[in-house]
Image: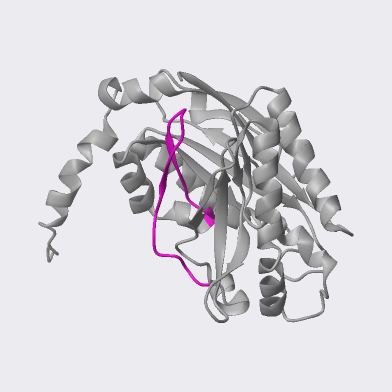
Amino acid sequence: MDRLRVATSQYFIRPVETFEGFASQAEALVATAADYQCGLVVFPEYFTVQLLTLGDIKRPMRDQIRDLADQQPRFVEFMAGLAKKHDIYIVGGSIPVRGEGDIVYNESFVFAPNGNYDSQGKLHMTRFETEEWKVSPRTQLKVFDAPFCRFAVAICYDAEFPELARAAARLGAQILVVPSCTDDRQGFLRVRYCAHARAIENQMYVINSCTVGSLPMVPAVHLNYGQASILTPSDFPFARDGILAEGNPNQEMLVIGELNLTTIRDTRTTGTVLPLNDSVRTAEILKNVEVSPL
């Protein structure tokens, strides 16, 4: 496949009264992406926090997050059904999942139209996740091998660690998907600027999906700041400013763009510069670092 049309959501967080209310909002976006002949649709990190409004929002947040993790089997069944129904790949944002004992992880499930699915856990926790929610990091990076190309998922803060995207690119990933959830402009821009850098460093597309809207009654998600985007390397064959498409900040939107995967493959060998290829020297250079007194 040479071209892939993708959709990324600026997902509006709002209170829901039932699981079906959440499901209706999510399915509408998947159906719209399918109507626009997209092969992949992306949801943001923690878009599932809407489901917190089904429980006791006055309980400590660490307890609420564990209650949300109990929704994971129903969520996975629902999203897997959407992927099959609409014949589309879905990166399902993220949802807390339970581990052993009281351990909880932040997990992004990836769903295929044939009913298969797998997941990528968040590898680096923000201070809030560690200190307030008591969410634990996973330890494995995965590269998903889809018929259109290989891709990886870096959940929000993980995009700020360049080694992850570089490892995925060296294994053939042509797309990095970044589901994010940020409550203010500074947090959003940390992710956005790093996403741009990952696109340039690895000569890959980066798809960022963001939460917008608010849950005023739920601490930690009462504010959201986001602008979904599809980012490219910075070179002649690609979009001006390295932005293939982006939404209007903080509005409910579905951002759609078409990726030319042949161009990505070609630019890794014929681009104006070849950062992915040339990065093989970095490991040797790092063996020869010294502090030079002045």
| Residue 187 versus residue 179 in the image, above or below | below
Residue 141: within the magenta? yes
Q: Nearer the viewer, residue 44 or 243?
A: 44
170 over 16 or under it: above or below: above
Find residue 124 and report its horizontal and vertical position in percent.
Answer: 46, 64
**Numbered range of the magenta stretch:** 136-156
The rendered magenta stretch, by its main secondary structure, is classed as: loop
Quadrant (top left, top right, bottom left, bottom right) of the C terminus = bottom left
Question: Which of the pair 67/291 is nearer the observer?
Answer: 67
Q: Residue 31 in the image: state x and y as whole percent.
A: 75, 32
The one of 88 and 25 positioned closer to us in this rendering:
88
Residue 53 or residue 200, whichever sits in front = 53
Q: Where residue 119 sits: x, y (%)?
A: 51, 53
Residue 53 makes an appearance in the image: yes
Q: Is residue 272 magenta?
A: no
Q: Residue at 37% of width from left, 32% of height from top? A: 203
Among all residues in the image, which is located at the extreme left?
288
- Image quarter of residue 27: top right
* Residue at left offset 42%, top offset 18%: 237
Q: Is residue 284 left or right of residue 156?
A: left
Q: Residue at x 58, y 57 (%)?
A: 187
Measuring from the top left, give residue 285's x and y in whole percent: 14, 50
Say how many tags the image has. Answer: 0
